[in-house]
Amino acid sequence: MATNGHNVPTSNGHVNHPPASTDPAVYDSHHQKFHASALPTTSEEWVERAVEVSQILGQDAAIRERENKSPFAEVALLKSSGLTKALGPKKYGGGQQGWNVAYKLIREVAKGDGSLGMLLGYHLLWSWTSAVVGTDEQNDRMQQLIIENNYFVGGAVNPRDNDQKITDAGDHIVFNGFKFFNTGGVISDLTVLEGVLEGTDKHIFAIANSRQPAIKFGYDWNNIGLRLTESGSVKIDGVQVPWTDALGWDPETKAPIGSILNKPFATLLLPTIQNVFSNFYLGIALGALAFATTYTAKNTRAWPYTPSPNKAGTDEPYILQRYGSFFAHLRAAEALADTTGEKIDEVYRNHSARRDLSEAQRGELAEWVASIKIVTTDTTLRVTSGVFEVTGARATAGKVGLDRFWRDVRTHTLHDPVAYKEEELGRYLMKGEYPSPTWYT
């Protein structure tokens, strides 16, 4: 079992120990197949690779979810398949795909396993951090580190907790703090840290090795949904990072570089990750629909107590009507998700070199992201709960595993209140106001 071996008291004062973990060897045949083949080259091939991984994970997703083991095996599968490298530069062995493709990969994986779709999404976002808030030299160095080593990246950046404190210690900085949520940290190789430099109000992002004594995981993630995401707490206890790795900061003057950090472009991590959320919500709901239709075709019986009984559940008008409605709403949500993904990719393609994104362009993008967040939240909650109405009472059995889709969506749609996204979009429509960049917008 791969852990850093260090425990930290949880929020309730108890000390948890590393849980059981899955063994990467269970996917050996798939690892061998992926290692023997080249990375995909076209966007279509990348999506096909994600579909293949999703199908592998979907075979026993319900069982693995109940066991709630740390997903070292599943993350190893993401790595060997190459999906973790999708955004990376080709010169270091990456796929150099755009975010429009990355969002589709997240969605596909989430169809088979919502937790792994979420983990892939967070990894891709955190591995992109230096491209948004780092200098060109820092980003090139970080991309080489991540892609050549095929590292998995987690993040201790939950903004609802107190900021981590950063102290200047000569040629390096030191992070100290506690985060209640830390998605993927336990099974990560690198962790993105963020905090405020002591004596200032200036934030610093940096990337540190996850396997060190100063990063102490709480091993306390045991929630109703997304159970394999290892999103529990972490104590950052004296993590040292060289000033040269303080993203977007000048290591000589120890000051933020205005041409990097004082621009709207530097706030793009927030809409980018918000759209990660929407895509794994959507993937989970699409997975629920596929699972439910298969179950209905095989198991759901027609209702006999009616003037005109049908022979099979697949002939029941109310079942067909409900499935038709689910399908239509998910199809519309996919179209909006694809459009939003293209908008985000276009921003990065057109503005990364000069970081010349305007406040208005950033605001327009935020409203596309808000739109899909609202639509996917409403639609996926409706679909993942509604599938029970078209599968029947026997589908509530624990061994069926249909409930995991709703539990996954319900858990993460509480991340930030969607009502504020609706208000934000209403202000944009009625008053022409763009939202001010925040940790959630």
Image (cartoon, rainbow, N blue to C red):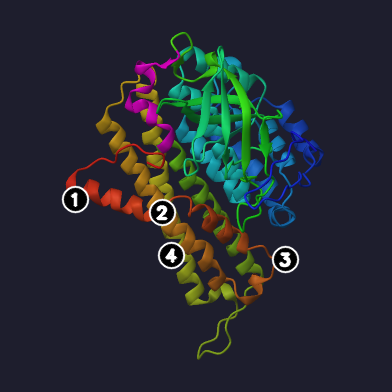
Mark 3, mark 4: which one is toward the viewer? 3
Pointers 2 and 1 in contact (C-beta within 8 Å): no
Point out which mark residue 430 bears: 1
Looking at the rendering, which quadrant does residue 3 occupy?
top right
The structure residue drawn at horizontal position 53% and vertical position 62%, both measured from the top left corner, is 384
Residue holding disc 4: 325
Pointers 4 and 2 in contact (C-beta within 8 Å): no
Point out which mark residue 417 bears: 2
Mark 1, mark 3: which one is toward the viewer? 1
**Which amino acid does the dot numbered 1 rest on?**
Met
Name the secondary structure under disc 3. loop
Q: Earlier in the sequence, mark 2 or mark 1?
A: 2
Q: Name the spot of residue 280 as percent of width and height, x first.
A: 52, 47
The structure residue drawn at horizontal position 19% and vertical position 50%, both measured from the top left corner, is 430
User: How far apart are the alpha carbons under marks 3 and 2?
Assistant: 32 Å
User: How far apart are the alpha carbons under marks 4 and 1?
Assistant: 30 Å
Location of residue 212 with respect to 24 vertically, above or below: above
Q: Is residue 184 visible?
A: no
Location of residue 224 with respect to 246 vertically, above or below: below
Location of residue 112 with respect to 36 vertically, above or below: below
User: How far apart are the alpha carbons under marks 1 and 3?
Assistant: 49 Å
Q: Which of marks 4 and 2 is nearer the N terminus?
A: 4
